[in-house]
Image (cartoon, rainbow, N blue to C red):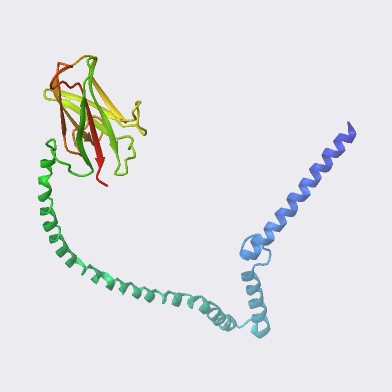
Amino acid sequence: MFRGMNERVAIVVTLIILFMTITICLCYVAIFVSPELPLNPFPPSKVANLDQDQGQGQVTAPNPEGTVRSTPTFPPTWTPTATATPTGTPTPTFTSTTTPTATPTDTPTPTSTFTGTPRPPTRTPRPPTVTPTFTPRPTEATSLWKGKLRATWVNCGSTGLFGKVRGPSGNPIADIWVHYWADGWDGAWTKTLADYQGEAADRNWDGLLDNKPKPGNWHIAIASGDGSRQYLSNTVTVTTSSNCEGTGAAQWGEIEFVRNY
């Protein structure tokens, strides 16, 4: 227990000494920064007064003129502080603010003359109004594809359409939408395959119309997408009959679309 108390006393004494040391250092720093603090037992003003009193005693202690002679010594010491005021003379450097003469850059206002140029281009879109002429179902190839009826086939069990969508070299072209429809019927869209199908490899698309002979006039064209009626080819028409025997019998139409390049 006593040993513990001695350690505590030692810690307390150490902290007191450390605090006093820091306090003394701070006092020295404060006196160095501001010698006129009350902490300084010998401020410069007091020393100057002592020197003045001693000087007066050496010249003539009873003569009051000594005090008059000592007073002129103060003004010279204060004159250096007055020199700090001329440092304000750099303020004329703000004359550089005259640089805003760059404001004449507003002269580019004549660029407003360019606003007149857009008017002629706005008139140019008027010719494209002719584009509605492409909305009718084409009868001739308009751009990419050319379609034709290759043959009709007799089938007493179903009616439909099939064929090829290929390139000029004969290779099948996949992911092309074929739209087939009839008057009064919106029809259906089918996407082409990458390979020819069937035993005769005669198709990469087909569409079933009915599970029996069904007469009608069917229209087929290449569409720009699923459900689209914007066509990229001419329209091919196939006529089917209700009879599957005899003259004019036809239930399946074979249509081929070839890309123009």
Depth check: give the residue in front, 23 or 63: 23
In the depicted structure, whether residue 4 falls above or below residue 84? above
Quarter in which the N terminus is drawn: top right
Is residue 9 found left or right of 176 in the rendered image? right
Looking at the rendered structure, the number of numbered marks drawn on it comes to 0
Which residue lies most toward the bottom here? 59
Q: Is residue 164 above or below residue 133?
A: above
Residue in the image at 17% along x and 42% along y = 141
Q: Quadrant of residue 242?
A: top left
Q: Residue furthest front?
A: 246
Give the image location of residue 78, x and y in percent: 53, 77
Name above or below for residue 157 compared with residue 150: above
Q: Quadrant of residue 244?
A: top left
Residue 54 x/y as whole percent:
67, 78
Q: With 216 as the anchor, is 85 left or right in this view? A: right
Give x and y (percent) for residue 16. Answer: 77, 47
246 or 257: nearer the viewer: 246
Give the residue at x 68% y 67%: 42
- Closer-to-camera residue (48/90): 90
- State which quadrant residue 13 falls in: top right
Percent x, y for residue 110? 17, 67
